[in-house]
Image (tube, coloured by chain):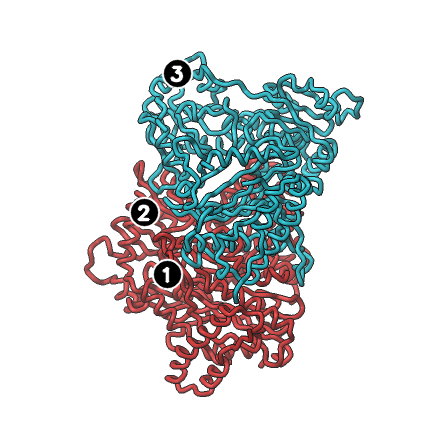
Chain colours: A cyan, B red
Amino acid sequence: MSPKITTELLKQLRQVMKSPKYVQEPVQAYIVPSGDAHQSEYIAPCDCRRAFISGFDGSAGTAIITEQHAAMWTDGRYFLQAAHQMDNNWTLMKMGLKDTPTQEDWLVSVLPEGSKVGVDPFIIPADQWKRMSKALRSAGHDLVPVKENLIDKIWTDCPQRPCKPLITLDLSYTGVSWRDKIVALRSKMAERKVLWFVVTALDEVAWLFNLRGSDVEYNPVVFAYAVIGMNTIRLFIDGDRMMDPAVREHLQLDSTLEPEFKIQVMPYGSILSELQAIGAGLSPKEKVWLSDKASYALTEAIPKAYRYLTPYTPICIAKAVKNASETEGMRRAHVPKGTVTEIIAADKAEEFRSQQKDFVELSFATISSTGPNGAIIHYKPVPETNRTLSVNEIFLLDSGAQYKDGTTDVTRTMHFGTPSAYEKECFTYVLKGHIAVSAAIFPNGTKGHLLDSFARSALWDCGLDYLHGTGHGVGSFLNVHEGPCGISYKTFADEPLEAGMIVSDEPGYYEDGSFGIRIENVVLVIPAETKYNFKNRGSLTFEPLTLVPIQTKMIDVNLLTEKECNWVNDYHRKCREVIGAELERQGRHEALRWLIQETEPLIRVQ
Amino acid sequence: MSPKITTELLKQLRQVMKSPKYVQEPVQAYIVPSGDAHQSEYIAPCDCRRAFISGFDGSAGTAIITEQHAAMWTDGRYFLQAAHQMDNNWTLMKMGLKDTPTQEDWLVSVLPEGSKVGVDPFIIPADQWKRMSKALRSAGHDLVPVKENLIDKIWTDCPQRPCKPLITLDLSYTGVSWRDKIVALRSKMAERKVLWFVVTALDEVAWLFNLRGSDVEYNPVVFAYAVIGMNTIRLFIDGDRMMDPAVREHLQLDSTLEPEFKIQVMPYGSILSELQAIGAGLSPKEKVWLSDKASYALTEAIPKAYRYLTPYTPICIAKAVKNASETEGMRRAHVPKGTVTEIIAADKAEEFRSQQKDFVELSFATISSTGPNGAIIHYKPVPETNRTLSVNEIFLLDSGAQYKDGTTDVTRTMHFGTPSAYEKECFTYVLKGHIAVSAAIFPNGTKGHLLDSFARSALWDCGLDYLHGTGHGVGSFLNVHEGPCGISYKTFADEPLEAGMIVSDEPGYYEDGSFGIRIENVVLVIPAETKYNFKNRGSLTFEPLTLVPIQTKMIDVNLLTEKECNWVNDYHRKCREVIGAELERQGRHEALRWLIQETEPLIRVQ
């Protein structure tokens, strides 16, 4: 990895920051956030503006360029990578360290009095705008929206915004038609007394209309907005995708429909002017519902008195709770793949996955790492670091895929030779943590963060820990990371767990320079049977959807309790039954033999 | 309990709300919060204004009176009590229920356009003022500070503000002199570049000067403020308490001292004008440090640009981490009391406590409850509800005291006859939870909320739970509830645990109409020895300071693991050793026999 030379680019950017062609008044600083106009976690190449201007292409980071300085804020996962990828025009601001200034504090310290700080109002979420604008104003500066994105002005070979064909999902996959979803949404709107609902997150648009796409790698979404009124539906989407007869039929564009279900298709770029028109026509007490993470540009289109902002939209909540068709699909999607450099192993995993029914694409870049590379939590093999799998090192494979019936994400850690006692000890603690979460029983409405320590307790007893959360929400043929639930020591963005939600359970342990261990299943929240049932509040637990053997060679059986040992044996019995039957059906006898061998029951000596 | 008749009082209040004698302009609503000018949890009788106007005397509640309405917001602990104590002039607003409006929303719904809402600026914390003021302003109303407290105007027999003698604590109790505490505080001030620090919480003033008092029941504090400059110390305190030679010597008021340690004693009531004078004399970049919970009145005395507000003051943090003298004192303070109606038991407990060395007063009202009364978490026996202890019902005793060397808080649950299998089952789950927290090992810097589920796991497995947090911070001869740490599913006000902090460990189970179970020890955070020590991050665990037998008759030994059984036996061995020696020294042979009998080891059948 050699750094990107950015001297010329920064010079050009500083010119457009002063050019009356692009800015009403010169801006003394320009902010380049990570995201796109939909606040997506994964973004399309045309939205990688921060990577373009700086060279740093990690998933999180904010660049700020002033006349004299260029600075990049990122977190602990990326300190090393950002330092490698950026040249010395850039100052790395290590977030989370005590002496690192916030973006606001740094701006105030370097800017001349009465400065203007510019940002693309489509890229910055409204809540961030508010915070930053306030801090700058109190120091005598102004945050100003710059309508033309200034990076785009100097990015001569910027790729086009993707506009890939759509996939329509029928009732057998989704369980609920888009019409019924609109009806449910309108009833939530009526409850809250709002007249309009603006859908800005890409996975929420996809979910609402039972559409999928491939505009963003790994995430089966499509660039679109929607505005739902009590009697109107407007879908903002580009390209000739709407000419596809399957799509026209799915959305009933050519049918005679009740007017309140008639979808008006409009250009993607017209969302702002349409919202402004709606905003201008509102009477007192008429409200428009937006996520408080929607872009500043769209939020501003609605006068303040008419906005109804919430951190979670009703679509976000409804999407998280999977219905019977979706959970059935998720179950089907969770078939295992067969078992070499790291890259070959990753490619092989993809090849096996792609042979399965309903395969669409991977759900994230496969993490295939051996030995010390396993300790790099967000490792992705590239030719320079590619190691050969060996019988002396632990191999970690974290992979997943998008199928039409579900999204998968599984991690297994294995050894092809003889693991050391220490490796087995650590693996077994991680397994105990995995089981503690998977088998946990808890009252209905418990928030995921209250389960996080169960995953760590066995590690903690010996003075070990891992520095990431234990689980994230998983979409249904949607984003592999989705809100609003999860299992983490971090307590933000954590809505109560309820039956039908799907999360990952993935504790780990990472020994720098030596190995990485992670055991990850995707698990479904289901009702549990308990003796006293929390006075009818209801009991919950998890059902593993992932059915892939956990390498018994890595387990120190003597460290397991009887209950834990039974859990492993029950899990492996289920793997044999469900996956064995499928392998037999597919005639994959070698894989079947491997499955039988890997699921032999553990025997615990008392 | 019959309701207080408030018709006449409300009429009088509504008159003063319009009287030019007390308000510059009439106010259409008046807010009466719970607290005093120091945002104390426990308050003096003269500050019980909300109880006076409404009759409702629970620890949490806010009254709002308009020309037409009188409404009271309180939480689930008090729904029943508030409904009993208030007459039908009042509307009870049940906080936490979905349909209950917030105070702001309710005000907006009932007030005529352009109303003024009054509140005593000394009673409302600055952060609450800000939130409420903003909400009212956006609806066209104004929150206005009313300098004269309007309740005091109609409260003809209002008790005087207490002004009790002071207790000085020498180095053997505090470990650090007040001079050294001032030096440490000034170094924190220099770090943050602030020139002044305003101490507003009563326990923070008491801790800083190594003084105690008894102005507030159960809390050994004194009405006072302090303002610390880099070269000055101002203590705002009333009465002839400063004439006490012991106090004068302790504070070195008559000694020739370096000027920066000379304490200027000023009247309690002059704090506002002194702060205003400081505020008026500040130059740019000179800052004044206040808690964001300080009153609106004091916060406003410092112009906005000069304020430095934090949620926790450095005194709050320093106070939470006990030094060697304080932990030694806490250990000494934790001697047990011997073992009738509930009230007699409570009185007896107090009598035994008061015979111990260094006893000052109780640390809270003793909870002595038998049978169904035990299920009322905040139960306090009064003649109408007083039940006779019997051999058929579970008895719960939660009591504590203030000693010069420490503050105690202990709960034990016992049965004087034969407990039912269900009672034993529930007790044993609670015990398992108590042990899970007490024996937990966790990395240095873990927040208490991450341990809360350990206390619930055994109950959860059977579908049982309890609806309160698991632990609170405990002061050192200070408030029995103190911040900034605790163990709760609620995640606010939760600073990381570190060695020297002291919290309670008190899981419980409450069966409405039948019984209550709680097992509470005060525990000290101490370093733990672990195999791998979190890569030198450090390991922590708890040491029980409370040494009182846990009734073995209530334990179903077969539900305990071997490790849990050993914990109980080790704990009881320590009780025998430490408390047995003390009882022997005091010549209390009957108690000693009881102790030996109650600490017989459990035997677990494999």
Query: Residue B110 at what x, y percent from top left?
Result: 65, 43
Is circle 1 on the same chain as circle 3? no
Labels 2, 1: front one: 1
Disc 2 target residue: B196
Distance Cα–Cα, label 1 vs label 3: 58 Å
The reply to whether residue A363 is in sight is yes
In the displayed structure image, the side of residue B380 where residue B217 appears, left or right: left
Labels 3, 2: front one: 3
The reply to whether residue B86 is in sight is no
Tag 2, which secondary structure?
strand
Which residue corresponds to the image point at 50% horizontal and 41% vertical from the top-left?
A397
Quadrant holding the N terminus of chain A: top left
Distance Cα–Cα, label 3 vs label 2: 43 Å
Disc 3 target residue: A18
Kind of residue at badge 3: Lys
Kind of residue at badge 2: Trp
Given residues B419 and A190, the one toward you in this image is B419
Marks counted in the figure total: 3
Tell which subunit mark 2 falls on.
B
Query: Circle 1: is it few (<14), some (14-19), or many (20+) Cα within 10 Å?
Result: some
Residue B527 badge: 1
Query: Residue A392 at what x, y percent from top left?
Result: 41, 46
Among numbered discs 2 and 1, the one appearing first in the sequence: 2
Q: In the image, is residue A175 above or below residue A461?
A: above
In the displayed structure image, the side of residue A494 where residue B403 appears, left or right: left
Tag 3, which secondary structure?
loop
Query: Circle 2: is it few (<14), some (14-19), or many (20+) Cα within 10 Å?
Result: many
Q: In the image, is residue B512 above or below residue A319?
A: below
